[in-house]
C-alpha cells in the first residue's frame, strides 16, 4: 500500500534534509532582483547567460529544416559583435541526427529530451529505448523526466531506480533530470525530489526545473530551492550537481536575476555552462539585443536579430 | 540539513570569489538639499533665536552635508505656542474627515518625493540606499495612509466612550530610522487631532526638516507640525515645556529613564519605546536556510541599528553547528560599503560615537572569552564601517549577551529544551521583540505566550506594518505605536 506509506517516508526524508519555508525563500529571492548590474559586470553576465543557453525547439511541427536553423543560431547567435555560441541545442530524439549534421564536432552540444517527454507516462522499457536511440544518434546530453506519479504516491525507490536505469542507458552522455516542479507543487516536494534525484546521478549531471509544457515553469523561488539542495548535497558529499532552470525565462533581466542567485548561493564554481544552463529559446535574442545595446549604445530594431524559433 | 551534514564531513567549501564582480551602481539623483536648515515653526522656516547652527555629516565620507539650526528653550517655546494656537483655533476643531484629507495628501507627497527622501536619508544616516528606498520611505508613507483612514473613525477606537486629543504633543525621535520614526510619531498624533512639536536626532535632522517642505506643499495649517532640531537640551525643553500634555520618546533606555524621572509628578502622558536585546530562537525542526535568512535580516538590517534587532541567537544545541556553518556562508556574500551603491547590504555606522561603542562592546566579547567571527570583507578607507560579526561560545553573563550593542553584532547561545529557551530569552531587562523558528504551529503559539516581548515574530523577523502595534515590556518601554493601540495613546479616553 504505497499511499499509506507515503506520508511516513516523506516525513523521514524531511527529517533528514530539512524543509523549506515558502514566504522566507520568496523574500530571499526577491533580494536578488534588487541587485543592480552596470557596465562590465552587466556585459559579463549577459555573455555568460548566452553561453549557458540550451537553445530549444520542442514542437510537434519541428522539421529538419527548423532544426538546421536552430543549430546555425546556436553556433552564431548574431552576425556582428563577439557573441559566444550557446551551450547546446535541445531537440526531440527524432531530430538528433539532423542536429548532428550541423553542430556535430563543434562546441555546441546536442541535448535531447527522452523518456516519453513531457509526461513520462510510458513503460520504462520504452523510455529507456528512447534514451538509447537518442544516444546512438549522437546526443551528448539527455533530458529525462522523473516519474512524478511515483514520487507523489510515495514510491521513492521506484522513482530513484528509474533514474538510475536512465543513467546507465546514457553511457557517457550527460543526464538532466527534470523534476517538473509545477506538478510537485510545494517547495518541500521540490527539495525532496531534488535530493532523491541527486543521490542516484553522477557528478556533473543536472537537475532541471521543468519541461516547459505545463502552466508554470522555472521561477526564482524553485530555482533557489534546487540551488540550495545542490549546495547542501555538495557540502555533505563533495559531489557537484549542475542546475538547469527551463521554461518561462524570456528576458535578459530575468536571466541575470537567476545568475545572481547562482553567484550568491553556489559561488564562482557554478558560473559556467558545465554547472548551469538555461532551457530557453526566446531568451537568446533578448540577451543578444542587450549585448548589442551595451556595445553600440542604442537598442536595435527587433528585425535586426535573426529568428531561431518561437518561444516555448 | 542537520543530520547528514553532521555524519559526513563537508568535502569542500564554496568559492565566493571575484569571477563576476558587481560594478559600482551608485544612486545619483539630486536629494535637493539646502546648505542650511532653519527650524520649522508655525509653517515656515525660521532661524534659531540665538543664531547657533551645528554641522551634520555624511557618516560614509565624514564630510559635512549641511548646517542645522540649534534650537534653544526660547525656540522650543515659540514652537509649542504655535502648536497650541493651531490646536485651539484650527486643528483641534477640524472635523476628522478634513484632517484625514491632509494626512492622505502628506502620504502621497512623500511618495512623490520618495527618491529625494531616500537619498537624503542615506546621505545623512549612512543606511544602504536599497533600505531607505524599499523600506524607510514607503513605510513612512504607509503610516500616513493608514492613520489618514482613522482620522474620521476615532469614535470606533473606544466604543461607548469619548475620545479627545491631548493638545500639544512633544516628540523626540532617534537616528536609526529618522523619517520613519517621524511618521510613526506624527501620523497618529495628527490623525487623533493633536498638534506636534518634534525634535529629530542630532545626527539625522535633514529628512525631518525636509518634511517641513512636505507640510507646506500639503497646505497643512500653520503650527500643526513644528520641527525643532538640536541636541539633548532641545529634547529636554520639548519634553518639559508646560504646553506639551503628552510626550512620546523613542531612544535609549538610559534617556528614557531620565525622562520618566523628569516628568514624575506632572500630568503629562508618556509613552517610551526604548532599547532591546531580542532573542531569535531557532528550533531543530526549523527550515534552516530561511531561519538563517531571518537571522541575517534580524541583526544586519540597518547595520543592526534597530531597537528590536535579533541580537541574541538562541539555537537548539543539536543544530548549532549546522546553523553556524550556514550563517558564515551567508555573511560571506554580504556587501559592506558605500551606502549610496544599490548593491550595498550594510552601509555606514551612523556616527563615530556609535562606532566606538560597538568596537568597545565587541572588544569586551573577545576579552570575556567569546569567539569572534566576521566576514573579513574590505572596508572603505574613510567613513564609519563595521564588518558583520558573529560571536560563538557566548554565555548569558557576557556583556555582549546582556547589553544592547546597536550594531551588526550577533551573539550566539544554545539551548536544549523549549523551557531553557524561554528562560534564556526572558533573562534580560528588555522585552521589545523575539523570534521563533519552527515547523510546529502549536509550539509557535505556546512560545508567543511565554516570551515576555511586545512583538513575537514566527518564522520571520523584522516585519513591520502600520496596522500592527509595536512596543515593549520591562525596560523596553511602554505604550504602543501602530495599530489602534498606538492611536489610542494619542487620545484621552473618558
Image (cartoon, coloured by chain):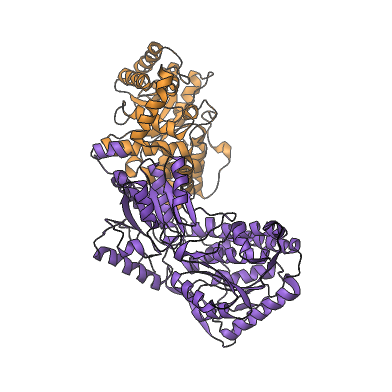
Q: Position of residue B464 (x, y in %)?
A: 53, 54
Q: Position of residue B285 (x, y in %)?
A: 38, 40
Q: Position of residue A197 (x, y in %)?
A: 36, 27
Judging depth in this view, the residue of B258 and A240 nearest the camera is B258
Residue B420 in the image: above or below residue B98? above
Quadrant in which residue A152 is drawn? top left
Say which chain is orange: A
Q: Is residue A304 toward the left or the right of residue B220 in the image?
A: left
How many marks the image carries: the answer is 0
Q: Is residue B211 toward the left or the right of residue B430 in the image?
A: right
Judging depth in this view, the residue of B290 and A62 nearest the camera is B290
The colour assigned to chain B within the rendered structure: purple
Q: Which residue lies furthest to the bottom in this view?
A: B50
Residue B358 in the image: above or below residue B442? below
Residue B17 in the image: above or below residue A278? below
Quadrant in which residue A72 is drawn? top left
Q: Residue at x 38, y 11 (%)?
A: A125
Quarter of the picture containing the N terminus of chain A is top left
Residue A81 visible, this orientation: no
Residue B83 visible, this orientation: yes
Q: Which residue is drawn at 24% across and 66% down?
A: B367
Q: Where is residue A38 in the image (x, y as percent from the top left)?
A: 46, 52
Amino acid at each position: 500500500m504505497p499511499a499509506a506509506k507515503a506520508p511516513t517516508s516523506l516525513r523521514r526524508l524531511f527529517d533528514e534534509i530539512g524543509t523549506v519555508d515558502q514566504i522566507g525563500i520568496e523574500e530571499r529571492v526577491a533580494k536578488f532582483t534588487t541587485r543592480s548590474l552596470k557596465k562590465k559586470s552587466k556585459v559579463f553576465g549577459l555573455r555568460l547567460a548566452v553561453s549557458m543557453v540550451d537553445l530549444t525547439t520542442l514542437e510537434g511541427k519541428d522539421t529538419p529544416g527548423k532544426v538546421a536553423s536552430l543549430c546555425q543560431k546556436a553556433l552564431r547567435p548574431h552576425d556582428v559583435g563577439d557573441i559566444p555560441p550557446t551551450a547546446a541545442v535541445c531537440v526531440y530524439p527524432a531530430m538528433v541526427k539532423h542536429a548532428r549534421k550541423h553542430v556535430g564536432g563543434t562546441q555546441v552540444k546536442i541535448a535531447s529530451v527522452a523518456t516519453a517527454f513531457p509526461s513520462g507516462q510510458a513503460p520504462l522499457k520504452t523510455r529507456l529505448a528512447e534514451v538509447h536511440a537518442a544516444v546512438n544518434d549522437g546526443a551528448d546530453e539527455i533530458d529525462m523526466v522523473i516519474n512524478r506519479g511515483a514520487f507523489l504516491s510515495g514510491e521513492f525507490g521506484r522513482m530513484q531506480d528509474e533514474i538510475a536505469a536512465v543513467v546507465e542507458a546514457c553511457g557517457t552522455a550527460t543526464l538532466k533530470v527534470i523534476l517538473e516542479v509545477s506538478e510537485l507543487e510545494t517547495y518541500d516536494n521540490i527539495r525532496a525530489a531534488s535530493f532523491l534525484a541527486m543521490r542516484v546521478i553522477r557528478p556533473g549531471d543536472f537537475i532541471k526545473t521543468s519541461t516547459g509544457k505545463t502552466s508554470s515553469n522555472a521561477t526564482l523561488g524553485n530555482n533557489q530551492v534546487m540551488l540550495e539542495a545542490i549546495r547542501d548535497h555538495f557540502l555533505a558529499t563533495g559531489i557537484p550537481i549542475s542546475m538547469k532552470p527551463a521554461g518561462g525565462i524570456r528576458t535578459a533581466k530575468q536571466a541575470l536575476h537567476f545568475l545572481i542567485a547562482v553567484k550568491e548561493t553556489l559561488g564562482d564554481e557554478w558560473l559556467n555552462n558545465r554547472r548551469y544552463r538555461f532551457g530557453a529559446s526566446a531568451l537568446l535574442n533578448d540577451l543578444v539585443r542587450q549585448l548589442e545595446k551595451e556595445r553600440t549604445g542604442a537598442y536595435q530594431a527587433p528585425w535586426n536579430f535573426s529568428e531561431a524559433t518561437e518561444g516555448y | 540539513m542537520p543530520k547528514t551534514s553532521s555524519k559526513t564531513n563537508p568535502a569542500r567549501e564554496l568559492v565566493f570569489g571575484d569571477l563576476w564582480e558587481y560594478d559600482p551602481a551608485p544612486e545619483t539623483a539630486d536629494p535637493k538639499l539646502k546648505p542650511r536648515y532653519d527650524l520649522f515653526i508655525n509653517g515656515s522656516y525660521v532661524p534659531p533665536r540665538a543664531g547657533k547652527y551645528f554641522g551634520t555629516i555624511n557618516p560614509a565620507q565624514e564630510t559635512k552635508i549641511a548646517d542645522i539650526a540649534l534650537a534653544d528653550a526660547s525656540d522650543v517655546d515659540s514652537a509649542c505656542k504655535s502648536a497650541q494656537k493651531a490646536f485651539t483655533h484650527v486643528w483641534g476643531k477640524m472635523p476628522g474627515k478634513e484632517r484625514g484629507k491632509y494626512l492622505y495628501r502628506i502620504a502621497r507627497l512623500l511618495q512623490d518625493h520618495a527618491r529625494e527622501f531616500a537619498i537624503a536619508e542615506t546621505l545623512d544616516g549612512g543606511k544602504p540606499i536599497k533600505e531607505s528606498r524599499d523600506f524607510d520611505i514607503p513605510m513612512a508613507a504607509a503610516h500616513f495612509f493608514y492613520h489618514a483612514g482613522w482620522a474620521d473613525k476615532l469614535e470606533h477606537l473606544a466604543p461607548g466612550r469619548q475620545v479627545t486629543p491631548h493638545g500639544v504633543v512633544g516628540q523626540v525621535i532617534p537616528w536609526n530610522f529618522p523619517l520613519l520614526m517621524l511618521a510613526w510619531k506624527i501620523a497618529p498624533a495628527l490623525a487623533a487631532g493633536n498638534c506636534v512639536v518634534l525634535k529629530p536626532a542630532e545626527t539625522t535632522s535633514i529628512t525631518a526638516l525636509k518634511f517641513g517642505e512636505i507640510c507646506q506643499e500639503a497646505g497643512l495649517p500653520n503650527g500643526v507640525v513644528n520641527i525643532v532640531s538640536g541636541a539633548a537640551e532641545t529634547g529636554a525643553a520639548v519634553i518639559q515645556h508646560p504646553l506639551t500634555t503628552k510626550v512620546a520618546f523613542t531612544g535609549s533606555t538610559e534617556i528614557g529613564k531620565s525622562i520618566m524621572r523628569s516628568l514624575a509628578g506632572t500630568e503629562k502622558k508618556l509613552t517610551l519605546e526604548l532599547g532591546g536585546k531580542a532573542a531569535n530562537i531557532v528550533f531543530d525542526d526549523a527550515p534552516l536556510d530561511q531561519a538563517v535568512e531571518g537571522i541575517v535580516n534580524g541583526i544586519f538590517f540597518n547595520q543592526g541599528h534597530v531597537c528590536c534587532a535579533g541580537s541574541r541567537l538562541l539555537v537548539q544545541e543539536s543544530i548549532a553547528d549546522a546553523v553556524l556553518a550556514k550563517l558564515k556562508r551567508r555573511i560571506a556574500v554580504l556587501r559592506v560599503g558605500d551606502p549610496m551603491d544599490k548593491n550595498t547590504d550594510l552601509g555606514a555606522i551612523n556616527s563615530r560615537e556609535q562606532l566606538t561603542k560597538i568596537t568597545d562592546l565587541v572588544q569586551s566579547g573577545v576579552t570575556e572569552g567569546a569567539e569572534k567571527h566576521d566576514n573579513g570583507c574590505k572596508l572603505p578607507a574613510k567613513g564609519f564601517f563595521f564588518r558583520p560579526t558573529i560571536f560563538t561560545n557566548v554565555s548569558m553573563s557576557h556583556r555582549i549577551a546582556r547589553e544592547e550593542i546597536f550594531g551588526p553584532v550577533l551573539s550566539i547561545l544554545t539551548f536544549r529544551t523549549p523551557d531553557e529557551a524561554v528562560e534564556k530569552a526572558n533573562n534580560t531587562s528588555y522585552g521589545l521583540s523575539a523570534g521563533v523558528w519552527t515547523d510546529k504551529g502549536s509550539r509557535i503559539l505556546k512560545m508567543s505566550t511565554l516570551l515576555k516581548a511586545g512583538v513575537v515574530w514566527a518564522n520571520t523577523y523584522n516585519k513591520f506594518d502600520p496596522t500592527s502595534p509595536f512596543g515593549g515590556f520591562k525596560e523596553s518601554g511602554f505604550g504602543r505605536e501602530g495599530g489602534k493601540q498606538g492611536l489610542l495613546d494619542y487620545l484621552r479616553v473618558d
